[in-house]
Amino acid sequence: MADLTELAGSGRMMLLVGAVVLYVASRAGVEALAGKEAWPGRRAVGHWIPIAAATLVAVAIHRGDLAVSIIFATSVGCLSLVVGSICIVSPNSDVPAGCGRMWPFALPAALLALLIGFAGELNWRHALVLLIEGGALGLAWKELGGGGSPAAAEIKEMEEDRHEFGGLRWANVGLCVLLSVIGGIAGMVGAQRVGRDFPAIPDVAMIVAVLGPILVLPMLTGGAALAQSNRGWAAITSAMAVVLLNLCLLLPVVTLIWYPAQMIDAKDWIHPKLLIPAIHHIASSGLGGATPLPFSWVTWRVDNVVLVLLSFVLIPASLGKWRMGRTEGFTLIALYAVYVLMEAAGRTHG
């Protein structure tokens, strides 16, 4: 880890470069997978690739706390910043019934993570439970999207590409992945450097305050464009899908990868001659000495609780019982600001 931080001349500059590259990667991913169309599923995957890359980079440098913070910070941002901005741009808009029924899926995922948090760690059993829940929610999502209602048929049609997914698009997806890895490395190194140069500012707080909003920002800009064409509900559905990908796929995968990753030195990832022997040692030792992924009390008590509250609040809107306008939008954005301050206070005094 020290070797990596020595590569950075200025932590703040590295953090800024990482944030910009991750933003570009997210926009490139959505452009490659969905273009200017509304396709919620494909837009979600495009936005999620940089989040996943930054999280895996954090695991590679043995910073499980940063990895978990990225997952929860971006999830909170999806349900507050993204939903709030859509409500401001397109207030009191109608939501297709088949689409709205998908929004409550974030609540059971957030509640399960909250229950797991009582253990103070994430082990392989927790990962399997999250994956099983993700599979069940994925099947339910597919069932709703493929229902017989006109709204459900419209959503299903949007998820089917009318054009061939050719080599150029795959090349753009590959570029998105490459930029995501580069941005993730720069962001993690920069955050660590800032934390080392300014001990009063924890690097985890920098991740939540800087990289979290940057990773969510492309959803805001793209969602605002959709909202102006009365398709803001597609942006909200995409944000909900990102939350599910974070909690039911990325979090358990990171938990499982953490066991072997902590036995590989950070600098070995870029040296194949060192990485191959390290992998052989892991295979022969049977992961002896590996410990579960830590689940900090700040992430659990602040991030996870806020995520549960936001998921619960959005249920009436998903059922058509509450039309969210500009007041609700500004309130959600204000709640995100309060969340960042609570996170910073918890990390500073924790």
Image (cartoon, grey):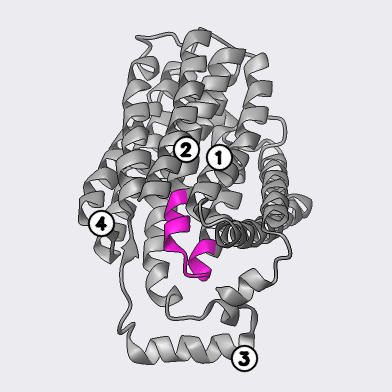
Q: Visible in this render: residue 138? A: yes
| Labelled pair 4, 2 in contact (Cβ < 8 Å) | no
Q: Amino acid at mark 2?
A: Ala
Q: Would you say 12 lies left or right of 47 here? A: right
Query: In the drawing, what numbered circle is on residue 246?
Result: none
Distance from the alpha carbon under mark 1 to that under mark 2: 6 Å
- The spot of residue 14 in percent (x, y) is 70, 57
| Labelled pair 3, 2 in contact (Cβ < 8 Å) | no
Which residue position holds label 1? 44
Residue visible at 55% across and 50% down in the picture: 51
- Compare marks 4 and 2 and give the one earlier in the sequence: 4
- Compare marks 4 and 1 and give the one earlier in the sequence: 1
- Compare marks 3 and 1 and give the one earlier in the sequence: 1
| Labelled pair 3, 4 in contact (Cβ < 8 Å) | no
Query: In the drawing, what numbered circle is on residue 273?
Result: 3
Which residue position holds label 4? 120
Which range is magenta?
Answer: 58-69
| Mark 4 residue element | loop
Q: Amino acid at mark 4?
A: Gly
Q: Would you say 294 lies left or right of 235 here? A: left
Above-or-below relation of 182 to 72? below
- The spot of residue 121 in percent (x, y) is 28, 60
Residue visible at 52% across and 55% down in the picture: 203
Q: Amino acid at mark 3?
A: Lys
- The spot of residue 141 in percent (x, y) is 39, 35
